[in-house]
Amino acid sequence: MTATPENVTGPVAHHAEGPVWWPAWGGLRFVDMLAGDLLTVRPDGAVDRRHVGDVAALVRPRAAGGFVVALEREVAVADDDDGPLRPLARLDDGPAVRLNEGATAPDGALYAGGMVTGPGATASLHRIDPDGTTRVVLDGIGCSNGLGFSPDGTLAYYVDTAAHRVDLLDVVAASVDPRGLVGRRPFATVDPADGVPDGLAVDAEGGVWVALWGGSVVRRYAPDGRPDAEVRLPASQVTACAFGGERLDTLYVTTSRQGLAAGAEPEAGSLFRVEVGVRGLPALPFAG
């Protein structure tokens, strides 16, 4: 793929993650995770910043308005962009684990996963129902990252970065299994020489676009798991991607400066966009 990414914001974040396009927000929102901030890109290119806690792991729209946000070890909701946060659920896998990434499912539940930050710990992927009920979906996780759903809503694609894989799960009704996701099996394995899998986005054709941390690339995997396209970025630590724009035909990509020496990779920490010739899927709102 020869499309050239455009730098949208410049290096506004230390560790940008989790981009989401939602028309009611006026466009794109993402997190500066370890700063605990939500960043919203306005139509004129300006970036608004709202501090929500020590960590802002993920943000998604709510069906009733406002947003849901995962913080260091809990999930909170706000009724509008400027409204106060109120706690919804506590997700505590121990002192050496914090929340890291997740997504909303077709049935309106939120999935949020943890990342191990110290020795002797393992993390989990949690399901949070609209009423705040929580349950563990997967355990023994090292670094829970990208999660997305197939166009027909029957499959989920999931990344545990520590496993160097994108996995596949079946989406089932909560009446069948209250976890909502079952049958985990490998979808695509990433050679560590190419980077490690981070966030992902699914397009309308069923292709899975995976950000490769350390690889300076977003790689597309066809529905059968074969890699078939790449977008190269001028920053090595590519964290996540999402489709946006009025037609959902622009891929937005976040990057990180975490751990880089001063002056290294001057565009790291920027948000990029690139036309990739395929449309994405709309964001799924949280029903709580």
Image: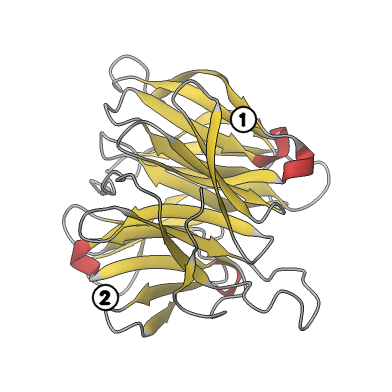
Residue 201 placement, left or right of 229: left
Answer yes or no: is residue 91 visible.
yes
Label 2 environment density (alpha carbons within 10 Å; few <14, some 14–19, many ≥20)? few
In the rendered image, the vertical position of residue 44 relative to residue 20, given as above or below: below
Q: Nearer the viewer, residue 189 or 67?
A: 189
Which residue is label 1 attached to? 139
Label 1 environment density (alpha carbons within 10 Å; few <14, some 14–19, many ≥20)? some
Residue 63 placement, left or right of 111: left
Which residue is label 2 attached to? 83
Q: Which structural element holds mark 2? A: loop
- Residue displayed at 19% across by 52% down: 63
Residue 94 placement, left or right of 67: right
Answer yes or no: is residue 73 visible.
no
**Residue 112 x/y as whole percent:** 48, 45
Residue 54 placement, left or right of 243: right
**Residue 175 x/y as whole percent:** 28, 18
- Residue displayed at 73% across by 43% down: 194
Q: Nearer the viewer, residue 261 or 57?
A: 261
- Residue displayed at 20% across by 63% down: 23
Q: Amino acid at mark 1?
A: Asp
